[in-house]
Structures are given as structure tokens and as C-alpha cells.
Image (cartoon, rainbow, N blue to C red):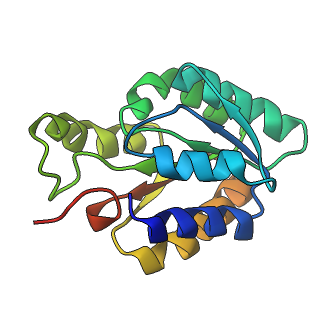
Amino acid sequence: MKKEAVEAIVDGLKQAGINFISLLPDSDFIEAQQAVMEDKSFACVPVSNEAIGIGVCAGAWLGGKKPALLITTDAILAGAFPLAVLNMQKNIPVMMVIPYRGAFGDGVWFMNAFNLTTEPILRDLQVSYTIVKDLGEIVPAIKQAQVSAEAWLRPTAVLLAGGIIFEEA
């Protein structure tokens, strides 16, 4: 991930008022995850799987925090049940920032499965999302996703694609 993207993610989270982050360590996202873990603006809780991260963020919200979840593309599959139960049934917002592996232009062959599943699953779970491909869009997208999550009391997602996370052809 580009250094400028990492800085924009951290800046966007701060500007959105995020003060609690849960994450599942991931090689595609490790630079951003390390940056938020080292930043004193955030309480950070690494987890062993995505479902736990969703639950931790729900608990943080109920405890008065503004949580965000930094997870992998495939985490949407693993987190579908807790997103449906905790966040959708109970109206607990969580804003997710996700590197969108498998997006159009991703040159890694086995990532294509995520191209076919990520957006349909988000739509089926009624998670509003935006796809960000340009560095200049990261901060506004994160801020807008958080405003929407809080206003609607629903999960939202910012999918980072294109040259932000992988080398474009």
C-alpha cells in the first residue's frame, strides 16, 4: 500500500472522529494497520477473526466509542452473520475500511472470487459502500461513511481499490 494512502486512511479516520479500531492483521493492509496501532488517537484491538472484530466494535459503540473495523476483503464473508445480527438487527453502526482485492484491474488470479462476492454480499447485507480508487478520495469517503453509519445506525464500508492497494496495469 502506498505511503500516501496509509496517511490518508489515518487522517480520514481522525477527521471522522474514530477513536476505536479493531483489526485482523493482513498483508494487504499491514502498513495502515500498523499506523493506527502506533497512533495514540486510537484505542486498537487486534482480533483473531472478523466476527470477533465486528462484536468488539459493537461493544465499543455501546460503550460510547466511535469504532471502525479495518479488515480484509474476504472478511465480509466471515463476518456476514455478526453483521446481520449485531449491526443490522440491533442498529449498531460500524464503519469498515477494506482493501478491495479482486476489484477490476487486480492482477492476482485467485482474487477474482472476491470480485464476484464482495459487492453482492454487501448489498445483500444492506451495507452501504463506496469504492475508492484515487488517493484524494480516501479522506472524504471515510468521513462520509462514518456520517452515514451514525445517522442510519447501519454498517458502512469504504472499499479501497485500484492503485491504492495493487499495481495497476
Q: Where is residue 150 in the image (x, y as percent from the top left)?
A: 73, 56
Residue placed farthest to the right in the image?
64
Say which of 82 and 27 sits in front: 27
Asked if residue 153 can be seen in this view, the reply is no
Q: Check the image and report above or below for 53 versus 98.
A: above
Q: Position of residue 2 (x, y in %)?
A: 39, 64
Residue 40 left/right relative to 114: right
Quadrant holding the C terminus: bottom left
Q: Which residue is drawn at 51% across and 33% down?
A: 25
Q: Check the image and report above or below for 98 versus 74.
A: below
Q: Residue at x 11, y 50 (%)?
A: 107
Q: Check the image and report above or below for 77 versus 37.
A: above
Tally of numbered discs: 0
Residue 106 left/right relative to 38: left
Quadrant holding the N terminus: bottom left
The quarter of the displayed image where residue 54 is located: top right
Q: Position of residue 9 (x, y in %)?
A: 56, 63
Residue 50 left/right relative to 101: right
Q: Residue at x 90, y 44 (%)?
A: 64
Say which of 136 and 55 sits in front: 136
Q: Position of residue 100 (x, y in %)?
A: 34, 50
Residue 9 left/right relative to 165: right
Asked if residue 114 can be seen in this view, the reply is yes
